[in-house]
Image (cartoon, rainbow, N blue to C red):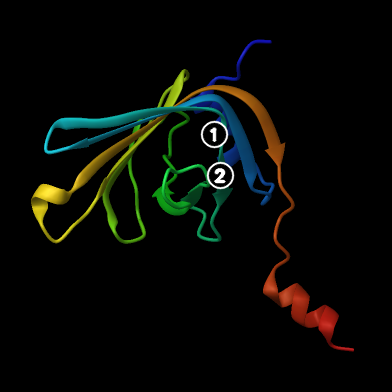
Amino acid sequence: MPSHPISSTLTNHLHQTSPAPLQITFATLAIHNSQNGQFLNHVHRPHSRIVLKKMPCQSLAELTVPDNLVFSFSFQFRIPKTQKFHHVEMLSLPRPLDHGKLFIDEEKLVLSFRIDAPDPSLRVEVTHTYLGICDLKELCAPVPEKSLKLHNKG
């Protein structure tokens, strides 16, 4: 079964009208950690997921990473105006994560970020490399709060 092109898959979802989040399962996730330029460890995980959703502000999207080594996290990024995007800055990263970048092409999705620490020598650089989309699943769109209030009256 041929894999879906990653950049096109994300771009198509972000430019459609459906508000439903998209869960993307990748064949492989490689996580590489280093500290002060020195290799710490490398982990391979099969069938790792991310969840992509558009934000109410039409120029932003959110990506959730449920398969991180330590904790799940989400970040926002600006949706590129063109159909192609490669290097994008991560916005709203949760502490202690910072200096996040997102790289996407047709073959891979790469997240790189830093786990900050008060002592600069303890900071850890992390890179997640996702390869080969093997499943796409639209998740149920959350019900807007306004709709919930209307249904509860009554």
Q: State which quarter of the image contains the N terminus.
A: top right
| Residue found 35% across the figure and 54% down from its top | 91
Give the number of the disc on residue 2. none
Q: Identify which amino acid the numbered label 2 is placed on.
A: Leu
Residue at the farthest front position: 41
Residue at (51, 42) in percent of width and height: 67
Q: Residue at x 60, y 35 (%)?
A: 24
Label 2 neighbourhood size at 10 Å, few (<14), some (14-19), many (20+)? many
* Foreground label between 2 and 1: 2
Q: Secondary structure at mark 1?
A: helix
Question: Are discs 2 and 1 less than 8 Å apart at CB?
Answer: yes
Location of residue 113 (image quadrant)? top left
The residue carrying mark 2 is: 52
Using residue 122 as the reference point, say whether residue 136 is left or right of it. right
Mark 1 highlights which residue? 10
The answer to whether residue 127 of the structure is visible from this angle is: yes
What is the x, y in percent for residue 10? 54, 34
Distance CA(mark 2)–CA(mark 1):
8 Å
Give the number of callouts: 2
Looking at the image, residue 58 sits to the left or right of residue 117; the answer is right
Name of the residue lying farthest toward the bottom: 154
Looking at the picture, how far across and down is residue 47, in whole percent?
A: 59, 29
Where residue 74 appears, x then y in whole percent? 46, 53
Q: In the shown orientation, is residue 85 left or right of residue 119?
A: right
Q: Is residue 15 visible?
A: no
Name the residue nearer the viewer: 141 or 1: 1
Q: Which residue extends farthest top? A: 1
Instruction: Classify 12 as above or below 96.
Output: above
Give the side of residue 35 with respect to residue 31, left or right. Answer: left
Q: Classify 117 as above or below 131.
A: below
